[in-house]
Image (spheres, grey):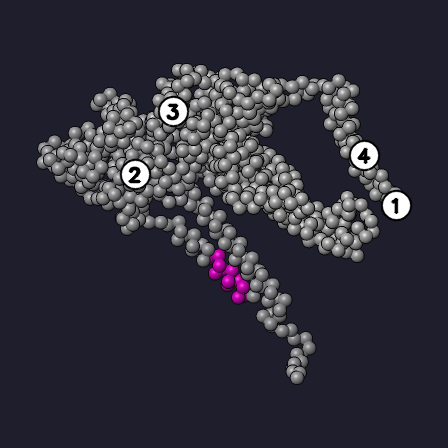
Amino acid sequence: MLNKKNLVLAVSTSALALASISSAHASTLEDTMERGAVRCGVSDGLPGFSAPDDDGNWQGLDVDVCRAVAAAVLGDADAVDYVSLNAVERFTALQSGEVDVLSRNTTWTTTRDTTLGINFAGVSFYDGQGFMISRDLGISSASELGGAAICIQAGTTTELNLADYFRANDMEFDPIVFDTSEQTVGGYQAGRCDVLTSDTSQLAALRIQLDDPDASVILSDVISKEPLGPSVRQGDDEWFNIVKWSLFALLNAEELGISSENVDEMLESENPNIVRLLGQDGNYGEGMGLEADWAYNIISQVGNYSEIYDRNVGMESPLQIERGVNALWTDGGLQYAPPIR
Amino acid sequence: MSVKSTPRPAGQKPPFWRDRAKRALIFQLLLITAVAAFLLYIVGNTQDNLSERGITTGFGFLSNTAGFGIVQSLIDYSSQSTYGRTFVVGLLNTLLVGGLGVLAATIIGFTVGIARLSPNWLIARLANVYIETFRNIPLLLQIFFWYFAVLRTLPSARESMAFGEAIFLNVRGLYLPQPLFESGFGLIPATFLVAIAASIALMIWNKRRHEATGKRIPAGWLSLVLIFGLPLVVLIATGVPVTWEMPELRGFNFRGGITVIPEFLALWLALSIYTASFIAEIVRSGIQAISHGQTEAAQALSLPRNLILKLIVIPQAMRVIIPPLTSQYLNLIKNSSLATAIGYPDLVSVFAGTTLNQTGQAIEVIAMTMAVYLTISLLVSMFMNWFNARVALVER
């Protein structure tokens, strides 16, 4: 009978061994360096934030955040593997390590930050939830929406805000929940619902995709705070810092007047802030495991925050969203990055 | 040629690895230990990794407030209800479409299956076309067809089709009057139950009498009259204690009455029609499996045609039909999870979709969802196995 006991022991120890191997994993930075590409979770197609263009290249504000990280880590903004995720899949994909950065118009909330095992690295866009409705209905305020059928995308904070708002105002509504934003727009266009609700930036993006954009209006009411930003897995502080400071580098660059066009001239600058950001004095990338020119790579290849904003969602884009609260703090907005020093 | 085995000295047992029974026992123990160790490893490893990554685990979330709305609910539900309740709402919605789907698929399937054997050339061809069309198009496409191509083309709420100012059909769904029962209505379901009990008793009595004396009365027809006639008489006698709540257009939508949402209609139609095409083939093969000689023999005894079907063909055909029919029922129920594609609030959509996303507890939510489908499927197969055992041919 000794035989059997030995075997059981062998089986259980090998199980233990396996468990200890799998729980020890290499750092995200090392994995990324080895792979030569940043794996980035983006949306399933939202113009202005993340959507493939005619040639199949991903474009948008969220995509540029991924590109900034890739430029900082690998020195090449194009070294990104994009993974298209719907609202339901996104957190599981990040948790399980399918992607290393989730940059997919995701709202920063307590639950997500504290119970999902993820960390938000900052706010790339300050948004709020609004309503889009057919112009013919002649409705001008969200408080007139009692009894309406409302199309929403599944698994978003939008679903919760909507229920809260209608309950607070003592109104009824029928939620019609779809899987993807494309199906949601389809439902709205077919008249399955009266109202389409989402973040106002998304509404602007979805509206220009409609067959007749002028037949729909976006109500001015904004019913929630939606700070959107990139997130990473909890437990890898080095990687968390890299994503956080890549975002801050974009904002600091705008504040210091460095753009993709003048970044090479700026290398000659005497301004100590610029000298530090571009890595001419000291190595601020070292603490993150990066080269001294990490921020230079971001700015020269991706641009600063205002360039990114303008070409993707701002006045140079079809979405035409004003800077508003997304202006720098120096211009009366909310965008504020800690200093590089 | 024979080999003489050397006789073993009495009292000396063979070593245990030579003993077949003991060896088998050891191997089985080893296998069980290995499987158990593997499962323990998976569970432990998952728990370690979850806690290491700071992901909340456990089923405590079920008592948290859900905070989102669901468009169709068979029980009271509001955004203030708990996640546990969203689970029940989703489960009931799944059972509703599954149950009604099984019912409709059975009726359509049996009708088409029998029609395929019809001596009428046109009817047989039509049934054949039905089967070959719906059996060979993927189910998801059929759901999209009903939802996007058929129901989306209906008029808007303001221009809805009205049938006698009581039933309305538009792109938002089908609106029906809702019966409101007044006091005294409880008598009608009670009479209905009494009538069913009486019919069963009548059937049994008729069968015993037939076996004893060879005489029979048309008990089937009598039962039908009893079951529907008796409650009707009571209904009229009590002065019809029912009022109808009519749907009416208020604001954006129709309010009041019963609303059948288009997502339900599309899913139900697609599931029933798709599965019915398979059931039709099962029914046809079941009937054709009965040797024609049996029918001819019955005709030779000058049994009437309906009795040949009832006593000779159907009992034997059921034996062939039921096992594959069970798997079609199971398929239908499992396929109902495609609901999520068109936004019907079934278990997968509200629980494994929205709830999973709001709580982020993927492992618990998916495990519960899988357990539900497994339980439903096992219950259906248990019932069908019991039914099969009842109709199985008794071998003498």
Report which residue position mark 2 lands on. Answer: A54
Say if labels 4 and 2 share a chain. no
Q: Residue A283 sits in which quadrant?
A: top left
**Is disc 3 placed on a helix, strand or loop?**
strand
Tell me if residue A130 can be seen: yes
Q: Tag 4's secondary structure? A: helix
Q: Secondary structure at mark 1?
A: loop
Q: Distance between the Cα atoms at labels 4 and 3?
A: 64 Å
- Residue A4 in magenta stretch: yes
- Label placed on residue A129: 3
Residue A139 in the image: state x and y as whole percent: 41, 16
> Label 2 sits on what residue type?
Asp
User: Which numbered disc covers residue B214?
Assistant: 1
Q: Residue at x 75, y 17 (%)?
A: B239
Cβ–Cβ under 8 Å for marks 4 and 3: no
Residue at 24% across / 31% down in the picture?
A: A311
For the residues beneath circles 1 and 2, the answer to whether they share a chain is: no
Q: Position of residue A41 (x, y in %)?
A: 35, 40
Asked whether residue A277 is in view, the answer is no
User: Between disc 4 and disc 1, whose residue precedes?
Assistant: 1
- What amino acid type is highlighted by mark number 4? Leu
Q: Which numbered disc, 2 or 3, marks the residue closer to the eye?
A: 2
Q: Tell me the chain of label 1.
A: B
Q: Is residue B44 left or right of residue B189?
A: left
Residue displayed at 42% across by 25% down:
A196
Q: Are marks 4 and 3 on the same chain?
A: no
Which residue lies under the disc numbered 4? B222
Per the rendered image, the range of residues in magenta is A2-13
